[in-house]
Amino acid sequence: MGPLVRLSFESDRPRKAGLDEAGALRAALAAAGRDLLNLSARAGSGAAECLQFQLALLDDETHVEPAFARIADGLSADAAWRRIMDDLIHIYGADPSEYVRARRLDVADLRDRVLTALHGERRAEGPPAGAIVVAEDLPPSRFLELDWSDGGGIVLSRGSTMSHTAILARSSGVPMIVQVGDIPNASQAILDADAGSLELDPSEETLRAFVRTSAARAMRAPPAVRADLGAPATYRGERVQLLLNIEGPESLSHPASRFADGVGLMRTEFLFLGRNETPNEEAQLEVYRAVLRWAGDRPVTIRTVDAGGDKTIGGLSDEGEANPFLGMRGLRLSLRRPDFFAVQLRALARAAVNDRLKVMFPMVTVPSEFEAAKAMFYRIVETLRAEGREARVPELGMMVEVPAAALTIADFDAAFFSIGANDLTQFVMACDRANGTVSHLYDPMNPAVVELVRRVADHGRARGAPVSLCGDLAGDPAHTQSLLKYGLRELSMSPNSLPAVKSAILAIGEAVLV
Ligand code: PEP
Ligand code: MG
């Protein structure tokens, strides 16, 4: 229950021009400038640099005046500003220097900030705590910018339960419903994500009833968590490893984490998304070491950054791709940006002095990419040692989430494999995972997907290379038995899912004994 706050990240919706378009643009520029000054007062040095760059652009007459000239020619304020900024983005994008090219994202951000102000809306920073956020869609970076510490919820006109925002919402316990269509304005609402319902401006009586039922729910005993969850899970006499999918060390505070056999997937892109500063080598090393400290003698698999798709990282990912999930993302992007990738590999190579660490690469499509990433890792370890630092090449594995990789799995010389059933399903079923309108076809248990899962599991067994599954399917207890039957013995899931999956495996064991 909370205030309903509408957020808009769409800067290209039509806007009705007024009588004084030049005045409107001037006001929007001033509002954007104020926001930037406020942000820069709060931001760390990395972000402050980007904000200063944007402020300098706003102050630069050569950039701003042409927009007023266009308005004088008859364009609306938003059309004029967009045209000038798009030209500038194009100029930055064509620059031979990587550094200057990367700045085009800051220009795009400034374009959108001013357009948002022209629409009379505010950016995502700061809806009141506990608000129910309404939007067309919500990118993961925006989810991370919002403060969920006091509760709140998400209602999306579009969206999908398989997007990365949904994964984050699930793991943070933020209620979210998607594909709701147009949502009328209201000041307050009750969101029940279990039932998939949203009640706008509820009556006093409904509000009172809601408070009573939620108090009763809170008093009810928590769902039965088996006392023996600490016991190791086995299937047909073989040990089953139940591992965690985490975004960072904070995910490990979940009470179910203590029942886990280690970390099966750390999605490191979340160290970069929604942050004011890009973590440098030392900051990354500290995070990786914190996870390893938590794990003790349990294994930890860290995945290198999987940016792109629906996870755009300013200064790194491409903007405006027609098919971002099929575009420059994952390992493809990391290999294209060795300057950025090297920083992460250096931190990982130093953390790998702890031999519980394993590292894997996302979105591997062909063996040459995997070989290139491995070769870079080896070179980096040599450089670090030459610098007198301790470093080691850990076991290097790969995500299997592209059908081509699953079909040619025997061609990859990897120490281990991890099946990314989320992406594998979207590619095999030709269903954009972020588009809920095709969710009826998005089925990770479709025989076509299962065939590839089995193929990879069989290959791993035959070659003696461990195979885990780390897509959301691993956290669905309804399918646990099937996954075990396919030969999988490592399942990696969000901490929320672990008790139910572990209970399901323990129950299978008992059923066999009976
Ligand atoms: C997957 O694709 O199944 C996966 C685990 O990776 P992500 O959800 O981060 O794309
Ligand atoms: Mg994936």
Image (cartoon, rainbow, N blue to C red):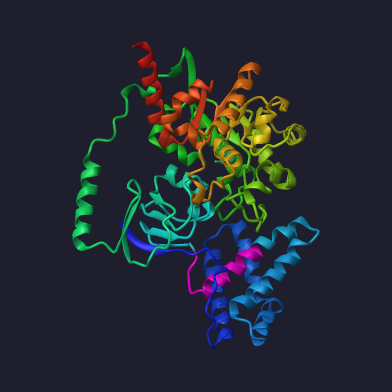
Where's residue 363, x and y in %? 65, 39
Residue drawn at x 18%, y 60% is 205
Please indicate whether residue 220 sits to the left or right of residue 450 in the image.
Answer: left
Q: How many numbered discs, if any?
A: 0
Residue at x 59% of width, y 80% of height: 77
- Quadrant holding the N terminus: bottom left
The quarter of the picture where residue 206 lies is bottom left
Write the start and end of the magenta stretch as one range. Answer: 106-123
**Where is residue 184 drawn, in percent x and y?**
38, 66
In magenta segment, residue 159: no
Q: Is residue 344 left or right of residue 493?
A: right
Task: Residue at the far right: name it.
Answer: 96
Along the line of sight, which residue is nearer the eye, 481 or 346? 481
- Quadrant position of the C terminus in the picture: top left
Q: Between residues 114 and 450, which one lies in front from this camera angle?
A: 450
Q: Ligand 2: give its quadrant.
A: top right
Residue 180 seen in this snapshot: yes
Report the predominant secondary structure element of the magenta stretch. helix
Image position of 463 with respect to 382: above or below: above
Task: Locate residue 339, reporting x and y percent.
Answer: 73, 47
Question: Measured from the top left, where is residue 165 in percent x and y?
Answer: 49, 49
**Residue 385 visible within the image:** no
Q: Quadrant of residue 114?
A: bottom right
Nearest to the observer: residue 512 or residue 499 = 512
Vertically, is 103 above or below 227? below
Looking at the image, is 192 positioned above or below residue 424? below
Q: Nearer the viewer, residue 499 or 44?
A: 499
- The residue that appears at 67% across and 86% down in the rendered structure is 73
Give the residue displayed 51% in from the left and 43% down from the top.
441
